[in-house]
Image: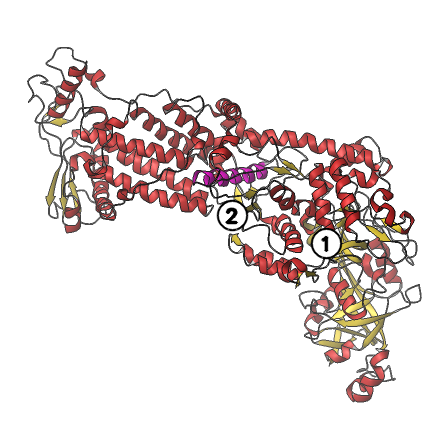
Amino acid sequence: MSTDTTSKDTTSEEAGRDYRDTLFLPKTDFPMKAGLPAREPEWLARWEKLDLYRRLRESAKGRETFILHDGPPYANGNIHIGHALNKILKDIVVRSQQMMGKDAAYVPGWDCHGLPIEWQIEEKYRKKGLNKDEVPALEFRRECRDFAQHWVDVQREEFKRLGVSGEWDNPYLTMSFDAEAKIVEEFQKFLMNGSLYRGSKPVMWSVVEKTALAEAEVEYHDHVSHTIWVKFPVIRFNKALEKKVIKNNQKLADAFQSDANTSSSVEGASVVIWTTTPWTIPANRAISFSPKIDYVLCEVVSDSSEKLIVADNLRADIEKNSGVQLTPVRLLDAEEVGQLVCAHPFAGQGYDFDVPLLAGDHVTEEAGTGFVHTAPGHGQDDYIIWVENFGSKDIPDTVNEEGVYYDHVPLFAGKFVLTRQGKEGNANAAVIEELEKAGALLAKGKLTHSYPHSWRSKAPLIFRNTPQWFVAMDAKIEAAGGKAFRDVALEEIDKVRWVPARNRNRIHSMVEGRPDWVLSRQRAWGVPLTLFVNTKTGELLRDEKVNARIVEAVAKEGADAWFERPASDFLGNDYNEADYERVTDILDVWFDSGSTHAFVLEARGIPSPADLYLEGSDQHRGWFQSSLLESCGTRGRAPYKQVLTHGFTMDEKGRKMSKSLGNVIAPQKIVEQNGADILRLWVANTDYWEDHNIGNDIIKSNVEAYRKLRNTFRYLLGNLEGFTDAERVTIGDMPELERVILHRLAELDDLVRKAYADYDFKRVAHTLSNFMNVELSAFYFDIRKDALYCDAPSAIRRRACRTVLDHLFSCLTAWLAPVLCFTVEEVWLSRFPSETDSVHLRTFPEIPAEWRNEALSEKWKKVRELRRVVTGALEVERREKRIGASLEAAPEVFVSRPDLMEAMKGVDLAEIAITSQAKLTEGEGPADAWRLDDVPGVAVVPKLAEGRKCARSWRILPEVGSDPDYPDLSLRDAAAVREYDAQR
């Protein structure tokens, strides 16, 4: 830096004059420290006193509606971090839609029936040594109702503490009498349209909870299973086809010749199956194979009289697991395999039936033998292929509700698959032992694999054939013009906006391949399947008068009426009570929540279908799907226009939270320590569409981000003190810098509105944080501090800046209110105190078209490019202690690029560089000048400012002392003080 002389004398010739009181420094009572844990409850109390939610509804009357329909959480415990994320996301959606000019009502709700609540009451009984089955059903149901109501009240306060706004005084509960009556009414629609039927199918069954579970109630964990390779002896070709096929097919005739000693004959051979559920062998009734697989007849090397049939591609794997060496004899074609009939391994011991081979698409060569053991009572694929070939007859019932073999099961009566606690029982070992005795066990082992478990008890499940109530997916839906139920649902999926878009394919594939909808559960707490069955004919009673009496009773007394009242109250005089069975199964809770569109939206006069459903990604097989099916089956359309999903919250290392790992992050603790707005900011900053993380370090980073935002608001408040409309400056009279900021506000308005509409809250939070921290604090505010503090009140530059600050305040408080609902309320009322107003009653400001100025914006991008080189050079000078502050500098900036020179026309280089003086020179500049590699064509030669230091603004200028009245001030500062003195 050059050594030009610089005056260090700042002593005022006007003896003792202290200019501090002439500066217009920021003034505000808005505290730097937020104190959110203490302050936020005060804001909640204020909003409740104002009846803010009702006022929002009144102010929005007549606007276009936006309805986010709340998916109900279970009322069975304190909220966790997933609940917090979900409800905050919903609140940001509702608040942003309201502030974008919509009427965005929000009715929160709770799922109050079903296993999660029932399980808690059973746990209480177990601790007391009581058996739930010995407690009167109605007493048990009352305890469930009380338990659910308790947790509704607890969770309601926890959700409100997060700042979630809604109709908390009148939420929906699936256990309220009006809701239960509407659920009954919705169920009756399936009864009346003919899609409801009783059938016997294998369903996922919890031995611990003694009920069928829906797919949405199932989670998958690693599980160690027994694996067995079992020999099923071939006994003949299929009798029904034997004469016809063999007569016309010499190859098959040769294959099954009477001489069993001929190596190429399949007589005396065994088909080898592989399974991970040995306990289902007693229920075996067939073997499945694939026509696409090459099967081979093999001789056992150690015993040439033993022949096995396996998939050729899996032969080596079978040899490895069994220790038996196989010699291929010949390939078998699909037609030949399909005509084989085997005996059961336990034939002669009560299992004397044929085991046919059935072609199935579900058979692969991924593992096993290429043959699939088929027990139609214990597997979905098994059931489907059996029904396709033989109908629903002869499907055995082998295991009862407690996972125990029935007494009629030969060899294994009384053996249990799982214990009452969900641990492995003695059935697998017993079956394996009997297979060894029968000489049918080729090999055995163990396998760790993903296996279905109850999400509540965490115990493994079994597939079990049980009588259940179903809705047929191929039923014709009158409300959709007679289209098949499944087709209606698939068509409606394509009309919905899925966010992210990939979720369309996910739910489409689920609905496309799903089995019939199982509605019944063998539980006590819930809405019953309110129907009667004729005991002689098995016909379902379909009578609108009976249905109406049931609905009326439930509406008055709740679902308990179905159990308390005599059947004659419902049947009336037209039917004999003795002729009818009253069904006592409970509706699947997913049917309850799937009906909420009916008893929340339609019943309350809220527009339906809803604009948005928002839940976790697991709800594609849960609430999203049950709601879709319920609505399509009764109304022929989807209950929603858009579906938005979020991922799951993991710890900072990406692990699932669990008490055993000690990594659970409780939202209550974050709120207690840091405030709900910190949690809300974390949600807004999160890639919530995917699985995401939270932890102490992540919370700390959001605390720091919040601090910067708060300080920016504090700066705005301090510098807007005393601002009135009389001070405003029109855009035409503003300096370029102010007009550039207004252009940015116009750009941000478009971005913020689109991001909120796209539910891209991270884009809102990141963009506004960057704007406030980088473009405002580190650029605009930094440059304009001198004008704000030192210019005269009447100066156009200061007035223009204050006008822009007012616009910034208006926009930023509106745009961030949906996220930082507590803080922005505090900010707003700090400037505009009121007993009745709230920032949340506002809408986003309308941005004048004249603020747009693309040409000016492009110009100032180049100005900022050049400025970056200058500030970089000054930073080096400060680091080397050649200057203390940038106002001591007077850099000379060399510019060789015409575009930058053009951009700098009309721009005060010293002002934007925050130096006392600066010189812009066209040219390359000296070789040793300071440069930035990514900004070519700019070179900076740092120099010291010449002149005296202004005692007020500290700028160093030759003009200081030119005004005889103020000999220690610059001309600008002298004029400002003169105006100040005149107004005193």
Q: Residue at x 58, y 60 (%)?
A: 491
- State yes or no: residue 766 in magenta: no
Residue type at the position of mark 1: Phe
Magenta-drawn segment? 81-101
Relative to 641, residue 14 above or below: above
Name the residue that disc number 1 marks: 190
Question: Residue 840's x, y, as percent?
Answer: 45, 32
Horizontal side, residue 295 vs residue 646: left or right: right
Picture residue at 77% right of the left edge, 32% below the top: 143
Q: Along the line of sight, which residue is nearer the eye, 980 or 475?
A: 475
Locate residue 697 relative to residue 293 in the image: left or right. left
Query: Would residue 542 be visible to someone looking at this image?
Result: yes
Are there few (<14), some (14-19), or many (20+) residues within 10 Å of tag 1? Answer: many
Q: Nearer the viewer, residue 874 or 858?
A: 858
In the rendered view, would you say 647 is above or below 252?
above
- Does the magenta run of residues contain 93? yes
Characterize the local packing of mark 2: few (<14), some (14-19) or many (20 or more) Cα atoms within 10 angstroms: some
482 sits to left or right of 945: right
